[in-house]
Image (cartoon, rainbow, N blue to C red):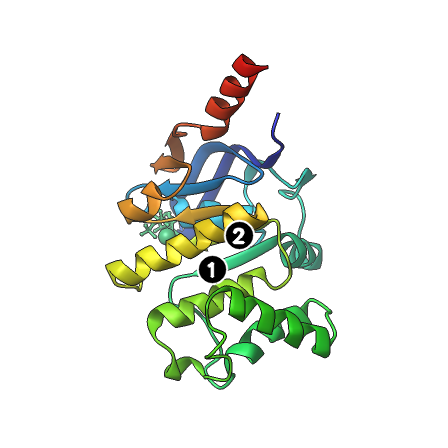
C-alpha cells in the first residue's frame, strides 16, 4: 500500500468580510494524495482550490477538519511551527514566478536554501545543480528580466526543489505561460516527479496540464466532487493479479 502523503478530512474555512457577511470557501472538503503521485486540482473559479492549497501548504489554518502532511497533523499548528513545517516538507510554485528581480537565477534559488539554514556555499552548489537540471545551465547569471516566462518558471521550479521537499504545490504554475511553454514546464515537472518521486499537486485551469497528471481532483462549491481515477489502485490491482 503506497503511503498517503496528504490526507484532508472534512475541511471547513469561512472568510468573514465584515458585519454578518461571510464566504464559506471550504464546506467539508476531503481528499487523499499518495506519495509520488502527480495530481491536478480543477474546478470553477471560487470553488476553493487556492484556499485548499494554502491550508495543505501550511500557509493558513482551517476552521475545522483535519490535515495530515507526511504523517503529521498540521491543522492545529500555528505560527513559527507552521513556517518550519512548510520550509522542510513543501515547495511552492505559483503563477507569476515571484522571483526577486535584482537577484540572478543562482541567487534566487540559493536564497531559499539559505533561509532554510543551508550554508551559503552548499546553497550555491545546490542552486547550480538544480538550474542545470531544469535546463538553465547557460542562464545562471541572468536576472529575471533577462529570462523568458518559461525560463523564469524553471527558476521557480528549481527554487521549489532546493530544500528537497517531498511535496511540491503549484497554484496555476503555468497560468502566465503560452501553450507551448506551458507544455514544456509540465513536462519538466512530470520528469522530476518520475525521477525523484516528489509528489506534485497542481491547481490548473488548463486541461492539458491535467492530462499530464496521474488523475484530476474536481472541486465545486468548497468541496471535492470527484477524486479522479486513482492510478495507483490500478497498478496495485495489476500487481496483486500477477503475484
Ligand atoms: N482572503 C479572503 N477573504 C475573503 N474571501 C476570500 C479570501 N480568499 C478567498 N476568498 C473567497 O473564498 C472563495 C474561494 O476562493 P479561492 O481563492 O479558494 O478559489 P479558487 O478556486 O482558487 O478560484 P480561482 O480559480 O479563481 O483562483 C471565493 O469565493 C473567494 O472570493
Ligand atoms: Mg485560485
Please report the residue visible at 38 percent of the width from the left and 53 percent of the height from the top. 186
Find residue 70 and report its horizontal and vertical position in percent: 65, 41
Q: Mark 1 points at which residue?
A: 93
Q: Which of 26 and 155 is in front in this view?
A: 155
Secondary element type, mark 1: strand
Q: Is residue 113 above or below residue 234?
A: below
Residues at marks 1 and 2 touching, judged by CB atoms closer than 8 Å:
yes
Total number of numbered labels? 2
On residue 117, the disc is none
Q: In this view, does 190 lie to the left or right of 183?
A: right
Please report the residue visible at 31 percent of the width from the left and 64 percent of the height from the top. 176
Find residue 135 and report its horizontal and vertical position in percent: 46, 68
Is any part of residue 173 visible from this angle?
no
Please report the residue visible at 32 percent of the width from the left and 58 percent of the height from the top. 182
Please report the residue visible at 40 percent of the width from the left and 45 percent of the height from the top. 49
Dot 1 surroundings within 10 Å: few (below 14), some, or many (20 or more)?
many
Q: In this view, does 194 lie above or below 4?
A: below
**Mark closest to the chain's N terminus, 1 or 2:** 1
Find residue 133 and report its horizontal and vertical position in percent: 52, 64
On residue 168, the disc is 2
Q: Gap in Å between the C-alphas at discs 1 and 2?
A: 7 Å
Dot 2 surroundings within 10 Å: few (below 14), some, or many (20 or more)?
many
Q: In this view, does 118 lie above or below 66?
A: below
Q: In which quarter of the image is the C terminus?
A: top right
Q: In which quarter of the image is residue 82?
A: bottom right
Q: Is residue 149 left or right of residue 73?
A: left
Q: Quadrant of the N terminus?
A: top right
Q: In this view, does 108 lie to the left or right of 20?
A: right
Find residue 72 and report its horizontal and vertical position in percent: 69, 40
Amino acid at each position: 500500500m503506497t503511503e498517503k502523503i496528504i490526507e484532508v478530512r472534512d475541511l471547513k474555512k469561512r472568510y468573514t468580510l465584515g458585519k454578518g457577511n461571510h464566504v464559506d470557501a471550504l464546506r467539508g472538503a476531503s481528499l487523499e494524495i499518495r506519495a509520488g503521485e502527480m495530481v491536478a486540482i480543477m474546478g470553477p473559479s471560487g470553488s476553493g482550490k487556492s484556499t485548499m492549497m494554502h491550508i495543505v501548504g501550511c500557509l493558513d489554518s482551517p476552521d475545522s477538519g483535519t490535515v495530515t502532511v507526511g504523517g503529521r497533523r498540521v491543522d492545529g499548528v500555528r505560527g513559527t511551527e507552521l513556517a518550519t513545517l512548510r520550509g522542510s516538507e513543501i515547495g511552492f510554485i505559483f503563477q507569476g514566478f515571484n522571483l526577486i528581480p535584482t537577484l540572478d537565477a543562482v541567487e534566487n534559488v540559493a536564497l531559499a536554501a539559505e533561509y532554510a539554514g543551508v550554508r551559503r556555499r552548499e546553497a550555491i552548489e545546490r542552486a547550480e545543480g538544480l538550474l542545470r537540471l531544469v535546463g538553465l545551465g547557460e542562464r545562471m547569471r541572468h536576472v529575471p528580466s533577462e529570462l523568458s516566462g518559461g525560463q523564469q518558471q524553471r527558476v521557480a521550479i528549481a527554487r521549489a526543489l532546493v530544500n528537497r521537499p517531498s511535496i511540491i504545490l503549484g497554484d496555476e504554475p503555468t497560468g502566465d505561460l503560452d501553450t507551448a511553454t506551458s507544455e514544456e514546464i509540465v513536462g519538466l515537472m512530470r520528469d522530476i516527479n518520475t525521477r525523484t518521486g516528489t509528489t506534485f499537486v497542481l491547481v490548473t485551469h488548463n486541461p492539458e496540464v491535467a492530462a499530464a497528471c496521474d488523475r484530476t481532483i474536481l472541486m465545486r462549491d468548497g468541496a471535492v466532487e470527484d477524486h479522479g481515477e486513482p492510478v495507483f489502485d490500478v497498478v496495485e490491482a495489476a500487481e496483486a493479479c500477477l503475484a
